[in-house]
């Protein structure tokens, strides 16, 4: 195992060394290209700031307004019938929107119920089985200027839904 650990520690420095060596061998202006890339990265980060800010404000409003809690209460009869703990629904709804908010919810669930509880295992599995679809689409589509993202959003949310359902089924079978 230590061999893999050592390789992983050396991978990035070796990659940089290889890139610099190839660029020098091809007589490219490596420092100028590095600075140009840094400028492009900075301008891209600035152009993405409004998208990120809008998404973070939306998530904060959704959680603070009580809309999330009201939605969970609305689903309570169905969740009871399906034997799905209602405590997990805020995570399921927040995960496609914000990874940070979802991590905070998962952390709260683990503190409240423990990592070896059914809810703790389900939260952990759900955290690894889904992704931050809105964040990914906002960043990647926003960085290249794509405005129409309907099909990508539908497929991403469908993949999240499948991940949530699969997490519930697998954890129920293994630990239920």
Image (tube, rainbow, N blue to C red):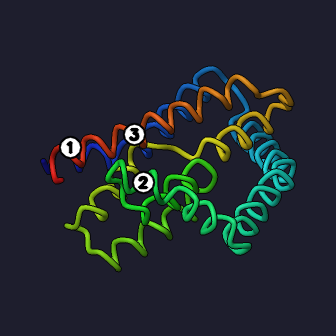
Spatial CA span between label 3 and label 2: 12 Å
Q: Determine the image quadrant of residue 134.
A: top right
Q: Nearer the viewer, mark 3 or mark 2?
A: 2
Q: Residue at x 20, y 43 (%)?
A: 4
Mark 3: give few (<14), some (14-19) or many (20+) Cα within 10 Å: some
Q: Position of residue 13 (x, y in %)?
A: 43, 46
Q: Closer to the N terminus: mark 2 or mark 1?
A: 1
Residue picked out by circle 1: 4
Residue picked out by circle 2: 79
Q: Nearer the viewer, mark 2 or mark 1?
A: 2
Q: Determine the image quadrant of residue 35.
A: top right
- Does the residue at mark 1 contact the one at mark 3 (Cβ under 8 Å)? no
Q: Closer to the N terminus: mark 1 or mark 3?
A: 1
Residue picked out by circle 3: 165
Callout 3: SS? helix
Callout 2: SS? helix
Spatial CA span between label 2 and label 1: 44 Å
Q: Nearer the viewer, residue 11 or 20?
A: 11
Spatial CA span between label 1 and label 3: 34 Å
Q: Residue at x 26, y 74 (%)?
A: 114
Q: Is residue 101 above or below residue 44?
A: below
Q: Nearer the viewer, residue 53 or 36?
A: 53
Mark 2: give few (<14), some (14-19) or many (20+) Cα within 10 Å: some
Q: Determine the image quadrant of residue 154.
A: top right
Q: Residue furthest bottom?
A: 112
Q: Is residue 44 above or below residue 176?
A: above
Callout 1: SS? helix
């Amino acid at each position: 195992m230590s061999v893999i650990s050592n390789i992983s520690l050396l991978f990035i420095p070796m990659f940089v060394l290889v890139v610099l060596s190839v660029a020098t061998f091809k007589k490219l202006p490596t420092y100028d290209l590095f600075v140009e890339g840094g400028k492009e990265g900075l301008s891209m980060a600035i152009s993405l700031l409004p998208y990120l800010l809008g998404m973070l404000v939306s998530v904060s409003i959704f959680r603070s307004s009580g809309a999330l809690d009201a939605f969970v209460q609305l689903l309570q009869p169905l969740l009871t019938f399906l034997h799905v703990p209602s405590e997990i629904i805020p995570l399921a709804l927040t995960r496609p929107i914000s990874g940070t908010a979802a991590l905070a919810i998962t952390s709260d669930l683990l503190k409240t119920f423990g990592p070896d509880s059914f809810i703790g295992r389900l939260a952990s599995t759900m955290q690894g089985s889904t992704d931050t679809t809105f964040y990914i689409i906002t960043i990647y589509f926003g960085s290249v200027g794509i405005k129409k993202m309907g099909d990508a959003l539908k497929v991403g949310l469908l993949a999240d839904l499948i991940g949530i359902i699969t997490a519930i089924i697998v954890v129920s079978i293994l630990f239920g």
